[in-house]
Image: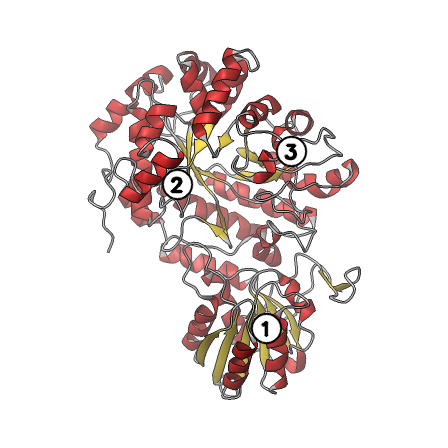
Amino acid sequence: MHDTGTGSTGNTAQPSRRTVLAATAGVTAALAAAGPAHAAAPDDSRLRALVSRMTLQEKVGQLFVMRVYGHSATAPDQADVDANLKEIGVRTAAELLAKYRVGGIIYFAWAHNTREPHQIADLSNGIQKASLELPRGLPVLISTDQEHGIVARVGKPATLFPGAMALGAGGSRSDARALGRIAGAELRAMGIRQDYSPVADVNVNPANPVIGVRSFGADPRAVAALVAAEVTGYQGSGVAATAKHFPGHGDTNVDSHTGFPTITHSRELWEKLDAPPFRAAIAAGIDSIMTAHLMVPALDDSGDPATLSRPILTGILRERLGYDGVVVTDSLGMEGVRTKYGDARVPVLALKAGVDQLLNPPDLDLAWNAVLTAVREGELTEARLDESILRVLRLKSKLGLFRSPYVSQAGVDRTVGTRAHLAAADRIAERTTTLLVNEGRLLPLSRRRHPKVLVVGADPASPSGTTGPPTGVLAGALNELGFTATALSTGTAPSATTIAKAVAAARDADAVVAATYNVTAGSAQKALVEQLVATGRPVVAVAIRNPYDVAQLPTAPACLAAYSWTDVELRSAARVIAGRVTPRGKLPVPVQRADDPEQVLYPVGYGLSY
């Protein structure tokens, strides 16, 4: 079924034992870490000895986590070679490691790093081999953003779970822990040892353009409990979890990818609202925390983003909250961190603020040389670099990278996308779908009374690695449940002609399911639902992103919140619609009235059942 050979990746499927021993000989000798695989991690004195033998250039490199294009560490496709040459000045991941000695590499689907699990494992092995064969070579900390829900870099056939807000609707710490445990085991099997998840932001702003359903919800205590549970799951599987985005990105209407947000919370409100999930993550032993590219004047009135703020990262995170793990920046290519200072100043200021890992600078050569120059000119001390390098090496040691840097194809087959894991994701999803409106007990739909179902609605681009489009997935799931369902994509902004086509199709159906996506007062999606309801056919609206859509759809006789348009969440919604599953989800955020946002229409904890 899978190609486990070397032809498609350019890497060996798994290095031979002789290659492994040769590549790691220098590191293992330095660590003197004899003994079985479960032996205690090397102590600081051995790690400090490693640091003492590093050149200044190697030290600077260890602080960077960088993207690189290609499915292979040594033989990427020509288009990826060209992209690497253009953006980084190297051809391959192996050349990136040789030139800059980076301590970490981040995987992206768009960089063609994550085609399928066996290829990912080969890429990870190729990266480790390339780094370990260098003089004084060290294992690489490979990371990715695998939040699940709408943000996932590794897709099918790996197991994909509901996103954070869906988990918030489920409210189960054991489900959050299971997600972390299973997802962590799958990432580790592919050689990914650091996951930039969970999101610890408390989403209290319905207009938040960048967090939204990536957050567990609006209640800081509930978010804190689920963050801690997910951290425990991930780290129990040997993957470093990362709580993000410190000091909190939940109350903003600006996306820090494209702008520079300001959080206007007072210090007291921050302590009450934003801090609890991060405190819980630290109490759970979180391995890394990611910074936010936003300004919080109550915590630091300098006008600097938190990523560059010593009062926030050292004064609050390190000293007040007592955190001594790895601090990683959010991507340094985002506008929020580039607004005030140039790309050469940002990495230096981040290190001065207390950061340990510099993630994905837009121009690595510029950033790398800026840090090198700052040390040579005395703005940064080598001792300051050593502090961060030691934290990174401690984490690599804890994760077993010095003992066992490679993964196997057999491990992928045993672990990734197994039937048991996929079934667990479905069960978790079934506990998250939230029923908000059910007039006249329309739901569940009856196969006898409503055999023909029309599925219309928004078809946003499918989240990474899921099937899509949403209308097709919903129709397919309903067909499997015994209905005769057809899909008609109407988009996020249907024209009058498209609406008329949907209305005509609805007249030939016994019921209509309408997938909605971030409906606003003037949205054509709202007009679509109203006109479908006017046909007299039963209409079920399914919000496939933010749950706030229900406030804009007062005429819909049935409304569900699915929290995302991934396959696993859409299948769960279909089973609820068909009555195969009883709706159990409860709103993790309040829904305000459309005509009076000061009034709550549905409070946190609201949810109907059958």
As measured in the structure, the alpha-carbon distance from the residue carrying label 2 to the one carrying label 3 is 33 Å
Indicate which disc, 1 or 2, sits on the residue closer to the N terminus. 2
Q: Nearer the viewer, residue 407 or 609?
A: 407
Q: Can residue 292 be seen? A: no
Q: Amino acid at mark 3?
A: Pro
Please give the residue where the numbered disc 3 appears in the rendered image: 305
As measured in the structure, the alpha-carbon distance from the residue carrying label 1 to the one carrying label 3 is 40 Å
Task: Identify the residue at horizontal 77%, vertical 36% (top origin).
Answer: 267
Image spot of residue 127 (x, y percent): 32, 33
Indicate which disc, 2 or 3, sits on the residue closer to the N terminus. 2
Image spot of residue 213 (x, y percent): 59, 54
Task: Identify the residue at horizontal 54%, vertical 82% (top origin).
Answer: 500
Image spot of residue 178 (x, y percent): 49, 50
The label number, if any, that marks residue 188 in the structure image = 2
Q: Residues within 10 Å of mark 1 (few under 14, many from 20)?
A: many
Q: Amino acid at mark 1?
A: Ala
Foreground label between 1 and 3:
3
Task: Identify the residue at horizontal 48%, vertical 33% (top origin).
Answer: 361
Task: Identify the residue at horizontal 64%, vertical 33% (top origin).
Answer: 306
Q: Is residue 232 above or below residue 57?
A: below
Q: Check if mark 2's residue and mark 3's residue have beta carbons within 8 Å.
A: no
Image spot of residue 203 (x, y percent): 66, 50
Q: Dot 3: what SS?
A: loop
Q: Nearer the viewer, residue 288 or 369?
A: 369
Please give the residue where the numbered disc 1 appears in the rendered image: 541
Residue 170, located in which quarter of the rendered image? bottom right
Q: Is residue 442 above or below residue 266?
A: below
Q: Dot 1: what SS?
A: strand
Q: Residues within 10 Å of mark 2 (few under 14, many from 20)?
A: many
Q: Amino acid at mark 2?
A: Arg
